[in-house]
Amino acid sequence: MDVPDTTYGFIGVGQMGFGMALNLRRKIPSTSNLIICEVSESRRDQFVKEASTIGKISVAETPRSVAEQAVSHLSIYLIMQILKTELNADRRSR
């Protein structure tokens, strides 16, 4: 599958989001930019150090800034809400 060369965003690279965002950075073209937003400075710096060896990384100060700059964006909160909805629907269908 060809992934377009564009700007992606990821909000939250904490305990759960770190691995997900790193995997995303590996899957998109190295020439694509991944913009992240993370409130923990140490976690943000750790992610940038590790992910910048794979491809372009930028840091946004706010989630709004990520949304304004990225063509596609994900947040760990959004992912968890989707999973919760799917899990509840699965339970109701049993």
Image (cartoon, rainbow, N blue to C red):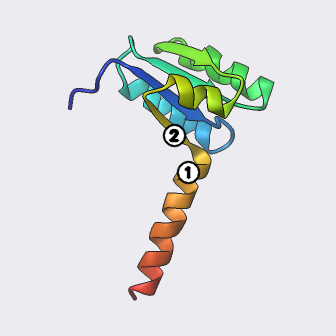
The residue sitting at 51% across, 40% down in the picture is 74
Q: Which residue is at the front of the view, 81 or 90?
A: 81
Q: Of the numbered discs in the image, which one, if any, rests on residue 69?
A: none
**Quarter of the image with the N terminus in it:** top left
Amino acid marked by disc 1: Leu
Residue furthest left in the image:
1
Q: Report the Cα–Cα distance between label 1 and label 2.
A: 7 Å
Above-or-below relation of 12 to 54: below
Say whether residue 32 is left or right of residue 11. left
Relative image position of residue 18 (x, y in whole percent): 60, 35
Element carrying mark 2? strand
Location of mark 2 (residue): 74
Above-or-below relation of 82 to 18: below
> Which quarter of the figure has residue 27?
top left
Element carrying mark 1? helix
**Quarter of the image with the C terminus in it:** bottom left
How many numbered discs, if any?
A: 2
Amino acid marked by disc 2: Leu
Location of mark 1 (residue): 78
Relative image position of residue 17 (x, y in whole percent): 60, 40
- Circle 1 Cα neighbour tier, 10 Å, few/some/many (<14 / 14–19 / ≥20): few
The residue sitting at 70% across, 24% down in the picture is 44
- Circle 2 Cα neighbour tier, 10 Å, few/some/many (<14 / 14–19 / ≥20): some
Relative image position of residue 9 (x, y in whole percent): 52, 29
Say whether residue 24 is left or right of residue 57. left
Say whether residue 92 is left or right of residue 15. left
Say whether residue 58 is left or right of residue 40. left
The residue sitting at 37% across, 24% down in the picture is 28
The reply to whether the C-beta atoms of the residues labelled 1 and 2 are less than 8 Å apart is yes
